[in-house]
Amino acid sequence: MERYLTTSEARQKFLSLVDEVEDGDQVIITKRGVPKAAIVNFEELQTLKAVARLWQDPEALRAMRSALDDVKAGRTLRFSGTPNVGKILAAARKKGLLRG
């Protein structure tokens, strides 16, 4: 859940806000009605930063585009349940990607 607080409200409730964002909520702090800062879960922030780095990496973008092309062209393997080596090899053989 995302909620907005003024700087004064955030100052008064700071410790409880830390607990709140630990559960995945986001708090936007406003100053004179304008969003100025956000309090988010640290793990969520790390994930967002990693995704941002990927989008800025030309090699990663090429790999993502190539993967999407493979999906669109049907060059994927499907599994039932959790994949393991045996299921991967069986699916690859069924699709004609492996012999034996």
Image (cartoon, grey):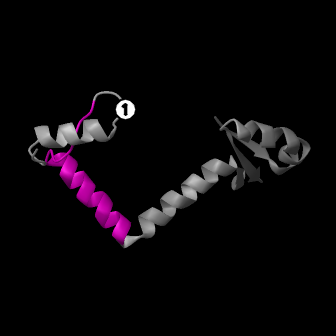
Name the main secondary structure of what is drawn in magenta. helix
Residue ID for mark 1: 82
Please state if 22 lies on the left or on the right of 44 as rendered.
right
Q: Is residue 93 above or below residue 35?
A: above
Please state if 38 lies on the left or on the right of 95 as rendered.
right
Query: What span is colored magenta in the figure?
Result: 59-79
- Amino acid at dot 1: Thr
| Residue ID at (91%, 43%) | 12
Please state if 46 lies on the left or on the right of 15 as rendered.
left
Q: Is residue 76 above or below residue 61?
A: above
Magenta segment includes 78: yes
Which residue occupies the foreground of this view, 79 or 7? Answer: 79
Please state if 30 lies on the left or on the right of 50 as rendered.
right
Quadrant in which the C terminus is drawn: top left
Image label count: 1
| Residue ID at (56%, 60%) | 49
Which residue occupies the foreground of this view, 12 or 95? Answer: 95
Which residue occupies the foreground of this view, 44 or 29? Answer: 44
Q: Quadrant of residue 54?
A: bottom left
